[in-house]
Amino acid sequence: MISITAIKNSSDLNDRIYASFLKLVSPERKQRAARFLRREDACRCIIGEVLAKYCIALREHIPLNEIIFQADEFGKPRLASAKTLDFNISHSKSWVVCAVDNGSVGIDVEHLCKHDIDIAKRFFHPDEYAMLCVVPEEEKKAKFYEFWTLKESYIKAIGKGLSCPLSSFGVYWENGRIGIKTVGELPTMVFKQYDLGADYKCSACALHDDFPDEIEIMTPEELLETVFELSTQTA
């Protein structure tokens, strides 16, 4: 089964918790966090890697300090010691989410802020844009972000980054299920959406439909406590 975990209130860490998380991440992640001008961005950056390590350690029964990430040719982080295991992280505002599976997996969470229908016209599949155009105005923002998170989760799952244009595939709804239209060598994958509150959209994508019914939700304090317990057990 795909493992999906989310950390709420992840953008506002006190100094003690931030310093504790900082000890658990790679030097590269520390440097990346230090470059952010806003503390909230640095918090999400740090939690993202800790959350990924927690999810992998729990699933694979390996110590956190043995989990090393490396980027592939498209820049997607991979677990250096397990080529078949895949994971993906996403964060927006208050949430950081992580999905882990034994095959390709992607996840995306977005806070519903301003949207521009012209973005859909320029970058989405023509069928998606046509669907958006007939959605009632008061529902357009939510539907736009449903499309956006579904498409981003797919892009992240196949791991080809910007080399795969958003317009090269289209998602749609049929009989309550989410489908995908692809061309060329793009794979057909399976989607599931999750509820993280009225102001957010979250979508996951994988090679199969063995998704959890609900996301495991933790606070930063709970994550830190659980990571400490894992470290103690494997020490």
Image (spheres, helix red, strand yellow):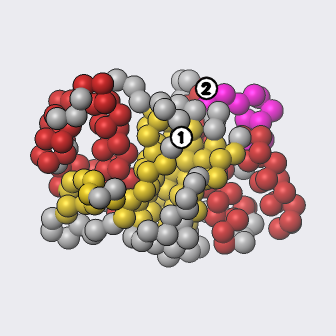
Q: Earlier in the sequence, mark 2 or mark 1?
A: 2
Q: Which residues are magenta?
A: 11-23
Q: Residue drawn 68% across and 57% down? A: 54
Mark 2 touching mark 1, by CB under 8 A? no
Separation of residues labelled 2 and 1 (CA atoms): 23 Å
The quadrant holding residue 146 is top left
Q: Quadrant of the C terminus?
A: bottom right
Name the residue carrying label 1: 196
Q: Evaluate whether residue 154 shows in this view.
A: no
Total of numbered circles in the picture? 2
Q: Secondary structure at mark 1?
A: loop
Where is 101 relative to 15, above or below? below
Q: Position of residue 67 (x, y in %)?
A: 65, 64
Q: Residue drawn 34% across and 23% down? A: 114
Where is 86 relative to 84, above or below? above
The quadrant holding residue 221 is top right
Q: Nearer the viewer, residue 2 or 133?
A: 133
Q: Secondary structure at mark 2?
A: helix
Q: Evaluate whether residue 201 shows in this view.
A: yes
Name the residue carrying label 2: 39
Query: With 3 as the anchor, is 190 left or right in this view?
Result: left
Q: Position of residue 110 (x, y in %)?
A: 44, 37
Q: Position of residue 48 (x, y in %)?
A: 59, 46
Amino acid, disc 1: Leu
Q: Residue drawn 17% across and 30% down? A: 118
> Does 180 appear in magenta?
no
> Does 21 appear in magenta?
yes
Q: Which mark is residue 28?
A: none
Q: Quadrant of the N terminus?
A: bottom right
Query: With 183 as the anchor, is 98 left or right in this view?
Result: right
Amino acid, disc 2: Arg
Viewer-nearest of labels 2 and 1?
Answer: 1
